Amino acid sequence: MAMTSGFSLQEATDLLGLCAFVETDGPQPPIPDPRNTWDLVFDSPVMGPFDNKWQLWRRKGQGPFAIAIRGTVAAAGSIIEDLIALMIKAEGTLTVSGIGHDYRFAADQSAGVHLGFALATLLVLNDPANGMITRLGNQIPEGSDVFITGHSQGAAMATLLRSYFHYSGGAPQNCSFKTYVYAQPKPGNVHYAEDFESLFCDPAMAFRVTNTLDWVPEVPFTLQSPEDIDKPNPLTVFASPTLLITLITKSLAEVHALIELHTRSHFQQMAVAVAQTKPAAAAAAGGPGALLAVPFAADFTASLDYVNAGTDFPLEGTPCAGAECHDALFEHHATTYFALLMSLATAAAGP
């Protein structure tokens, strides 16, 4: 059966099970074990400086495929990815240890994306041994139906991944894609969101499921300046972006130091591996000596105007009770989202 447009409660529930599995490396009761209805095709190791992980699944009976990206886990690198909340342009070259990775997440020249999520997505895509570009071409036949899904941090990365496949390539040929993400933190600015939604939400092929009591979809914090407003506007004449630029410039130095401290060895290993497969890229970067350069370089934009991206499917949250209220992530857990989706399914079934 060909992939159809529109929100499906069954699809949303099934794919949430894949998100829960990749986050815990196993079933997460009371969410049903996805291996009852899906086959695990590829299970990546933990990858790179941000402790990322992804899996490829296929529904039993030669059904559609699904790419599931792991969310934040209790590891330093994973948490750092969330915290690098500076914005880079949605199109450009991100240089990792001297090796440039060209990317395009949007056509709008004003679009910007979250540095941490973008950097992690590019590393997961381009890892020479276990990256998506290497693995998916060997595993997904041309013309297949493919879901893209993720929870939390994985939701932001899955959103950017969908954009990357559209603009930058790397996806299996002639496939149909549909995206379901859960508890998505904000992946970019309004121009990125509008670009994403015009491509994938207008045809009803991209959804973000949000618990109305979950705080994670409300971050990173948005700081809007007059320069973020489309021009011409009456504010630009009277206001200056100096304060915002000062804050971002200061943050850039701190972010460089943080990434240098935590990730240098990981970036080094990846850059060497990429250089072995891309001699021309290594030569252009200045040879092996260039691999000891600054860990990354990107085209930053002086903005912190973050928004969510995708057609929102809100779930009316249930307030915590008792011990639940001592868990700051209670409303964010995949199991909480599952319970809310199941309550919708029960209501739809009727008496």
Image (cartoon, grey):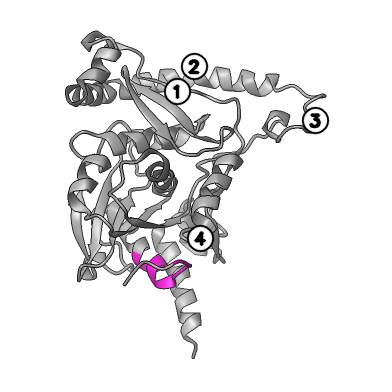
Q: Earlier in the sequence, mark 4 or mark 2?
A: 4
Residue with the mark numbered 3: 235
Residue 244 location in percent, x, y? Answer: 65, 24
Determine the CA span between mark 4 and mark 2.
Answer: 41 Å
Vertical order, 336 against 82 (above or below): below
The amino acid on which the numbered mark 2 sits, given as a three-letter code, is Ala
In the displayed structure image, the side of residue 291 where residue 179 appears, left or right: right
Residue 21 location in percent, x, y? Answer: 28, 57
* Callout 4 touching callout 2 (CB < 8 Å): no
Closest to the observer, 54 or 175: 175
Residue with the mark numbered 1: 298
Depth check, mark 4 against mark 1: the one in front is 4
Residue 24 location in percent, x, y? Answer: 28, 53
Depth check, mark 2 against mark 1: the one in front is 1
What residue appears at the point 52 percent right and 53 percent down from the top-left corner? 310
Work out which quarter of the rendered image holds the N terminus and state it. bottom left
Residue with the mark numbered 4: 203
* Callout 2 touching callout 1 (CB < 8 Å): no
Region rendered in magenta: 5-14
